[in-house]
Amino acid sequence: MQKKPVVIGVAGGSGSGKTSVTRSICRRFSDKTILVIEQDYYYKNQSHLPFEERLNTNYDHPLAFDNDLLIQHIHALLNQEPVEKPVYDYKTHTRSNKVIPVEPKEVIILEGILILEDPRLVDLMDIKVFVDTDADLRIIRRLERDIKERGRNLDSVIDQYINSVRPMHLQFVEPTKRYADIIIPEGGQNQVAIDIMATKIETILLKNRTK
């Protein structure tokens, strides 16, 4: 009988380095060991709304996420059942018709800005991590990402940061730090913290495999 997967939540503000931390941890293990589920893939489907209305979506608010589907998928993976992860299209501001087949693995990393905001998600986690990075670095990283990867222009990214990202971070993201078991300053640059996380995961896996 296979052991229940280990669930790790990696939260932090937009541009904090969550993805860098997750990738650094994944590099310590084989592809067959760790599954990454990004909260960004679980934005709500908005295909029923006119495009003009979709443009007003506040992607940094808890209500933007389809946590019901995310939780359903995590429960399935914990029961060793495969799922189909949705794909979000940032250019059309709604869920695409594509899905990504996902198989359960020994470790599930849930990564996202508000992954610690929903108590239902927190209750599923064995380890909770918050990546804590200064606001000036976060905005620079977000600028680079949104312009290069999401086809945005400078003015729109700055406007979104001032009107949505920053106030939502202060209201919803920053307070979830209190739920973290581990706080990692400076994200992927903090190799000591990443080493500690990797060692902890190795210890849990060894314990599970020898039971």
Image (cartoon, grey):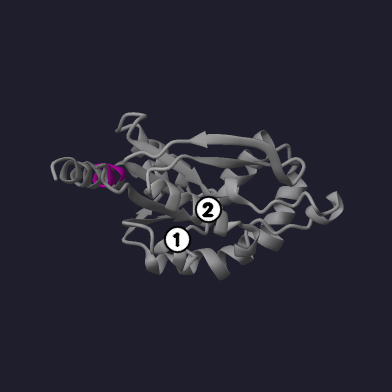
Magenta-drawn stretch contains 106: no
Q: Which residue of the protein is positioned furthest toward the front in this rendering?
A: 1
User: Which amino acid does the dot numbered 2 rest on?
Assistant: Leu
The image quarter containing residue 25 is top left
Decide if residue 112 is in sight here: no
| Residue appearing at x 31%, y 61% in the figure | 181
Residue under numbered circle 2: 70
Which residues, given as a range, are shown in magenta?
Answer: 194-198
* Magenta-colored segment: predominant secondary structure: helix
Instruction: Compare residues 197 and 1 and report the one nearer the observer.
Output: 1
Quadrant location of the C terminus?
top left
- Give how far across and how far down residue 119 sits, in percent: 45, 68
Quadrant location of the N terminus?
top left
Instruction: Compare residues 131 and 7 and report the one nearer the observer.
Output: 7
Tell me, yes or no, whether the two marked residues, 1 and 2, touch with CB atoms within 8 Å: yes
| Residue appearing at x 66%, y 54% in the figure | 44
Is 43 rendered above or below residue 195?
below
- Give how far across and how far down residue 176 sits, in percent: 45, 66
Q: Secondary structure at mark 2?
A: helix
Is 185 rendered above or below residue 122?
above
- Give how far across and how far down residue 200 sits, in percent: 23, 47
Instruction: Compare residues 182 and 105 and report the one nearer the observer.
Output: 105
Magenta-drawn stretch contains 197: yes
Residue under numbered circle 1: 121
